[in-house]
């Protein structure tokens, strides 16, 4: 847009654009949990993007968002080792993320997918470690903290709770129900901060994730019916 190509800073554009709020001024991303935005607020403050032009600010945030994927090769290596791959095989597996469709597109965009992907890989690795180790509190704690971190950027993390549950079912089968149950309680306690956001949504709005757009915006959309085949 013309504002993105402006030589004025974001602060100047915000001041000049003050006025009546229209339905198109809403950002549907506010329906998501705040985890990604909190993480990105750190470089935004450090690099003072509010006093940069839109083009420069976007470039800074895109680069910082891409850096969130930096641990992905290491995490893929650890996942491969956890499932029994040799060191050479795990080293080769570390290159697999490069083949993921749209990964470079997601990495170059300012969105919460980058943080979700990295945390999802970390959760998968830690779940494998929990399932395969009979002792140690650090793995259940790390799994719970990582699950909390993953629940805070995006709703697509919710199905990963199944991965945590399966990890403990495997642990219970291999090492006994009682020790697995005690470890599961430790993980659950560490997961409570991440779960709190979704519980609060149900209490306040009656749904896991409220609509990001207000009704005033939705009323402007064309009315009609679209068949599933047409949408597909």
Image (spheres, rainbow, N blue to C red):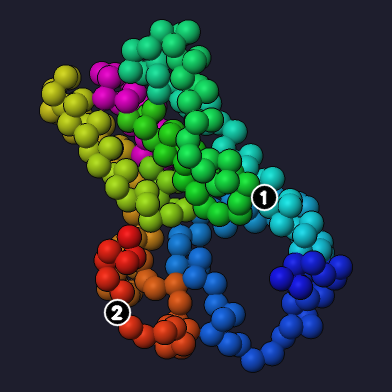
Q: Residue at x 54, y 85 (%)?
A: 23
Q: Residue at x 31, y 74 (%)?
A: 226
**Residue found at the very far bottom of the displayed protein:** 20
Relative to the observer, which residue lies in front, 196 or 178? Answer: 196
Relative to the observer, which residue lies in front, 81 or 42? Answer: 81
Is 224 drawn above or below residue 46 in the view shown? below
Quadrant position of residue 11: bottom right
Label 2 SS: loop
Q: Residue at x 27, y 66 (%)?
A: 228
**Residue 27: assigned label:** none
**Circle 2/circle 1 CB separation < 8 Å:** no
Q: Residue at x 78, y 76 (%)?
A: 13
Residue behind mark 1: 62
Q: Badge 1, how many Cα within 10 Å: few under 14, some, many 20+?
A: some
Tell me which segment is drawn in magenta: 128-146
Magenta stretch prevailing secondary structure: helix
């Amino acid at each position: 847009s013309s504002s993105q190509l402006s030589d004025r800073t974001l602060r100047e554009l915000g001041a000049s654009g003050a006025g009546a709020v229209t339905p198109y001024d809403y950002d549907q991303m506010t329906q998501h949990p705040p985890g990604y935005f909190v993480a990105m607020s750190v470089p935004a403050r450090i690099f003072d993007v509010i006093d940069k032009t839109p083009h420069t600010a976007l470039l800074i945030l895109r680069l910082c968002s891409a850096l969130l994927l930096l641990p992905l090769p290491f995490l893929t290596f650890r996942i491969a080792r956890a499932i029994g791959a040799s060191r050479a095989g795990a080293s080769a597996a570390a290159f697999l993320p490069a083949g993921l469709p749209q990964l470079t597109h997601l990495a170059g965009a300012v969105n919460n997918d980058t943080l979700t992907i990295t945390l999802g890989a970390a959760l998968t690795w830690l779940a494998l470690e929990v399932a395969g180790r009979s002792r140690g509190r650090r793995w259940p704690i790390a799994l719970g903290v990582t699950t909390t971190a993953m629940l805070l950027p995006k709703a697509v993390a919710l199905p990963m709770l199944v991965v945590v549950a399966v990890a403990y079912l495997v642990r219970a089968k291999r090492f006994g129900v009682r020790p697995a149950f005690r470890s599961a309680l430790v993980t659950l306690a560490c997961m409570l901060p991440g779960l709190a956001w979704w519980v609060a949504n149900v209490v306040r709005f009656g749904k896991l994730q409220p609509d990001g757009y207000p009704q005033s915006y939705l009323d402007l959309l064309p009315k009609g019916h679209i068949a599933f085949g047409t949408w597909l």
